[in-house]
Image: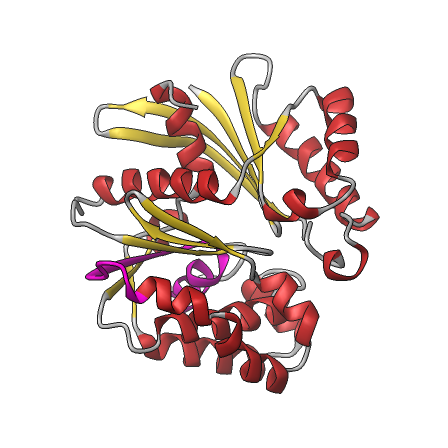
């Protein structure tokens, strides 16, 4: 077994992953919104508040997982690829917590996410060829087996650049143009949507809120195009307090931003859309247990 950590540009995700007969399974999971990419557009750094939230999340994870018994493999993504103070933060984490983070590039992130998704689909009995879309906090990975691109847009950086609904709606198409063209070039009979935007849409459609969220119920949900507009309208109807309960604290507007990006990406696609909770975290664990990471 291995403890796999995915430190994304918005979320800190941890899982204890075990090799089983038909692949790999999560024995224990934990995640927390740390918002690493917040303020990154302006400062070029991981902010102090984000760093403090990350350290709090690590303390919580250390209290839940046995880091003395299991090897830990930890990766960090786009916010840490571009922030000028990443190495300083990771040096402090090594000294304080004994966790060694690897900053991986966009290609590695996409391939490992694909591996995590592939394992989850097999457990659901789905063996079809598929493409993935992973809209993160500061970057988005799109691809199919052997063909991946990491694009420089994400829900936090996009939201912080435009802030208002009108500006986000105006700019979503421009921001996703290259990604949309690349997606169209793939064999898109089945598109798997992973990351917080589609999983939260699926959860709300299933009557789950942030606290009652269940990855097992969400994985395999078939998303319809209409679900995206429905989700944005639902969030806009909620006051901030209600939204905090429904989708998590301070997630309302970044989720709207991400849904607008996803809506533009999927526009005109004839594929079936399946939501999968598993992603980079599971891919990292699977790759380590396979001896390829």
In the rendered view of the protein, which quadrant contains the N terminus?
top left
Say if 105 sits above or below 42 in the image: above
Left or right: 3 in relation to 216: right
Among all residues in the image, which is located at the extreme bottom?
A: 166
Q: Is the image coloured rainbow, by chain, by secondary structure, or in one colour?
A: secondary structure
Q: 243 or 93: nearer the eye?
A: 93
Left or right: 129 in relation to 195: left
Residue 31 quadrant: top right
Does the magenta run of residues contain 205?
yes
Q: What residue sits 46% from the left and 62% below the top?
A: 200
Among all residues in the image, which is located at the extreme top?
A: 69
Give x and y (percent) for residue 180. 39, 68
Q: Is residue 154 visible?
A: yes
Say if 178 sits above or below 192 in the image: below
Give x and y (percent) for residue 290. 34, 21
Q: What residue sits 39% from the left and 27% below the top?
A: 287
Left or right: 236 in relation to 124: right
Q: What residue sits 28% from the left and 63% below the top?
A: 185
Residue 245 quadrant: bottom right
Say if 278 sits above or below 223 in the image: above
Give x and y (percent) for residue 267. 35, 77
Residue 159 quadrant: bottom right
Does the magenta run of residues contain 292?
no
Q: 119 or 89: nearer the eye?
A: 89
Q: What residue sits 19% from the left and 61% below the top?
A: 189
> Which residues fall within the magenta stretch?
184-207
Left or right: 97 in relation to 173: right
In the rendered view of the protein, which quadrant contains the C terminus?
top left
């Amino acid at each position: 077994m291995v403890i796999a950590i995915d430190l994304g540009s918005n979320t800190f995700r941890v899982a204890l992953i075990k090799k089983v007969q038909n692949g790999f399974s999560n024995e224990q999971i934990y995640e927390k919104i740390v918002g690493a990419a917040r303020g990154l557009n302006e400062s070029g750094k991981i902010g102090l508040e984000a760093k403090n939230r990350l350290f709090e999340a690590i303390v919580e994870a250390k209290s839940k997982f046995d880091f003395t018994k299991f090897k830990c493999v930890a990766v960090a993504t786009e916010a840490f690829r571009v922030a000028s103070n990443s190495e300083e933060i990771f040096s402090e984490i090594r000294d304080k917590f004994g966790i060694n983070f690897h900053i991986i590039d966009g290609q590695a992130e996409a391939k490992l996410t694909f591996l995590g998704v592939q394992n989850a689909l097999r457990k659901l009995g789905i063996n079809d060829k598929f493409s993935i879309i992973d809209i993160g906090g500061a970057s988005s990975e799109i691809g199919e087996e052997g063909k991946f691109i990491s694009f420089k847009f994400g829900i936090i950086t996009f939201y912080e650049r435009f802030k208002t609904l009108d500006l986000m709606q105006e700019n979503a198409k421009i921001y996703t143009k290259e990604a949309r063209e690349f997606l169209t070039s793939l064999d898109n009979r089945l598109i798997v949507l992973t990351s917080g935007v589609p999983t939260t849409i699926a959860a709300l459609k299933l009557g789950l809120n942030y606290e009652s969220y269940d990855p097992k119920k969400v994985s395999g949900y078939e998303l319809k195009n209409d679900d995206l507009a429905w989700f944005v309208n639902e969030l806009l109807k909620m006051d901030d307090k209600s939204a905090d309960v429904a989708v998590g604290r301070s997630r309302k507007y970044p989720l709207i931003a991400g849904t607008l990006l996803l809506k533009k990406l999927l526009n005109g696609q004839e594929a079936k859309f399946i939501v999968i909770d598993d992603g980079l975290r599971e891919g990292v664990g699977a790759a380590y247990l396979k001896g390829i990471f």
